[in-house]
Image (spheres, rainbow, N blue to C red):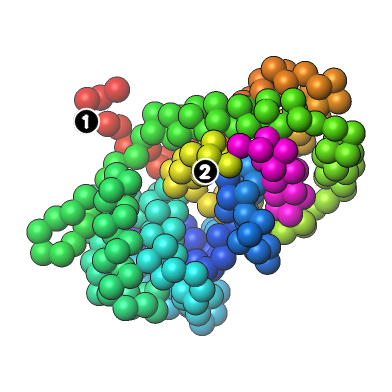
C-alpha cells in the first residue's frame, strides 16, 4: 500500500464542506443555494493536482492524507459533512478496504468533535461502507466493480423516468433553456463553469418532471457515487455533451421514450468512465466469492 507520504498524493484535494453536483441528484455546485439543489449530473471541481505535490501548509494525517485548513469542516451538519468526506475517500480508493477508522483521529484531522464523527461512522455503517469493530473503531468494507455498476444501473433507470416525465411536460421555453446549455458547453473550459452549466441542464429537467418523491428516491443513490472526479475523467466533457444533445433532440420532438433512453445512456456512460478509471488505478478488490 506504500508509505503514508506515497498514499497522501492520491487523496482528496478539495474542501469537505462544499460538495459539488454529481451524477444524478441534488449535490449542487459550489455557491448555489440548498433550495435549488436538484441536478442530475456528473460534475466536480478541478482536482487536477491529485498527483501533484501536497500544497504548502498541509499536514500529514488520516493515514497519509494531506489535511490542511481547506479540508476542515465549517458549514452544514457536521455529521453529514464528515460522512460525505469519508464516503468519498472510500469511493475514490483513498481509504482502502480493511483500513481502520478511529473516532479521535478523524475528529482531529477534520477539526470537529468526536460526536459528529461517531454519527458519521454509524451512518456509513448502515450504508455498508464501513463495518463496526470492537474498541470503538470501524473498518472500511470492500468495494467492487459490481457495486459501482449496480449503483449506476439503478441511477440510470430513475434518471430516465424523470427525464421521460419532463419530456411529456415540455414546452418551447423548456427546450430553449436546455438548448442554451448546449450552446455554451463546447467553448467552456473552466471546471466551475462546466459544473454550473451541467447543474442547470439537469435541474431544469428535474423540475419539469414534477415528481419530487421520485427525485428524492434518486437522490439516495448518490451516496455510492464519488464526488469530484470530473478532472480524473478526460473524456467526460465530450461524453456529456453528446448525452445532452441526444436528450435535447428527443425533447424537441416531444419523444419521451427516446428521451428516457438518452438519459439512461448518459448515466451509464458516466459509470463506465468511472469504472475504467478505477480499473486503471488498481482500486478494485475482488469479492470473497471470487466473482
Mark 2, secondary structure of its residue: helix
- Residue 170: % across, % down: 80, 31
Mark 1, secondary structure of its residue: loop
Q: Tell me if 217 is positioned left or right of 102 in this view.
A: right
Label 2 CA crowd tier, 10 Å (few <14, some 14–19, many 20+): few
Residue drawn where x is 76% and y is 30% of the image = 169
Q: Is residue 78 above or below residue 111?
A: above
Point out the image quarter for the C terminus. Answer: top left
Residue drawn where x is 61% and y is 61% of the image = 34
Q: Is residue 202 above or below residue 287?
A: below
- Residue 198 can be seen, yes or no: no
Q: Tell me if 55 is positioned left or right of 60 in this view.
A: right
Q: Which residue is mark 2?
A: 216
- Residue 226: % across, % down: 49, 48
Mark number displayed over residue 236: none
Residue drawn where x is 23% and y is 53% of the image = 139
Q: Which residue is mark 1?
A: 288
> What's drawn in magenta, residue-wise?
195-211
**Residue contact at pointers 2 and 1, CB within 8 angstroms:** no
Task: Compare marks 2 and 1 and give the one earlier in the sequence.
Answer: 2
Q: Nearer the viewer, residue 205 or 184?
A: 205
Residue drawn where x is 46% and y is 43% of the image = 220
Label 1 CA crowd tier, 10 Å (few <14, some 14–19, many 20+): few
Q: Kindly report the distance in space between the C-alpha atoms of the residues bearing marks 2 and 1.
A: 33 Å
- Residue 104 can be seen, yes or no: yes
Amino acid at each position: 500500500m506504500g508509505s503514508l507520504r506515497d498514499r497522501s498524493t492520491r487523496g482528496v484535494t478539495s474542501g469537505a464542506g462544499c460538495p459539488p453536483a454529481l451524477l444524478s441528484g441534488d449535490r449542487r455546485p459550489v455557491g448555489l443555494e440548498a433550495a435549488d439543489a436538484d441536478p442530475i449530473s456528473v460534475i466536480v471541481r478541478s482536482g487536477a493536482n491529485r498527483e501533484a505535490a501536497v500544497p504548502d501548509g498541509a499536514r500529514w494525517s488520516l493515514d497519509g492524507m494531506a489535511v490542511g485548513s481547506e479540508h476542515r469542516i465549517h458549514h452544514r451538519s457536521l455529521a453529514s459533512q464528515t460522512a460525505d468526506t469519508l464516503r468519498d475517500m472510500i469511493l475514490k480508493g483513498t481509504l482502502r478496504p480493511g483500513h481502520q477508522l478511529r473516532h479521535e483521529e478523524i475528529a482531529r484531522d477534520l477539526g470537529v468533535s468526536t460526536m459528529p464523527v461517531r454519527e458519521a461512522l454509524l451512518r456509513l455503517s448502515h450504508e455498508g461502507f464501513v463495518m463496526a469493530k470492537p474498541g470503538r473503531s470501524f473498518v472500511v468494507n470492500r468495494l467492487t466493480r459490481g457495486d459501482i455498476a449496480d449503483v449506476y444501473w439503478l441511477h440510470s433507470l430513475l434518471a430516465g423516468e424523470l427525464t421521460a416525465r419532463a419530456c411529456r411536460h415540455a414546452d418551447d421555453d423548456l427546450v430553449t433553456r436546455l438548448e442554451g446549455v448546449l450552446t455554451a458547453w463546447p467553448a467552456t473550459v473552466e471546471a466551475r463553469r462546466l459544473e454550473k452549466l451541467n447543474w442547470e441542464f439537469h435541474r431544469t429537467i428535474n423540475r419539469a418532471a414534477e415528481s419530487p418523491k421520485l427525485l428524492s428516491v434518486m437522490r439516495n443513490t448518490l451516496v455510492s457515487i464519488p464526488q469530484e472526479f470530473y478532472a480524473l475523467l478526460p473524456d467526460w466533457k465530450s461524453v456529456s455533451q453528446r448525452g445532452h444533445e441526444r436528450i435535447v433532440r428527443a425533447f424537441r420532438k416531444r419523444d419521451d421514450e427516446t428521451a428516457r433512453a438518452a438519459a439512461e445512456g448518459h448515466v451509464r456512460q458516466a459509470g463506465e468512465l468511472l469504472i475504467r478509471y478505477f480499473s486503471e488505478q488498481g482500486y478494485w478488490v475482488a469479492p470473497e466469492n471470487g466473482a
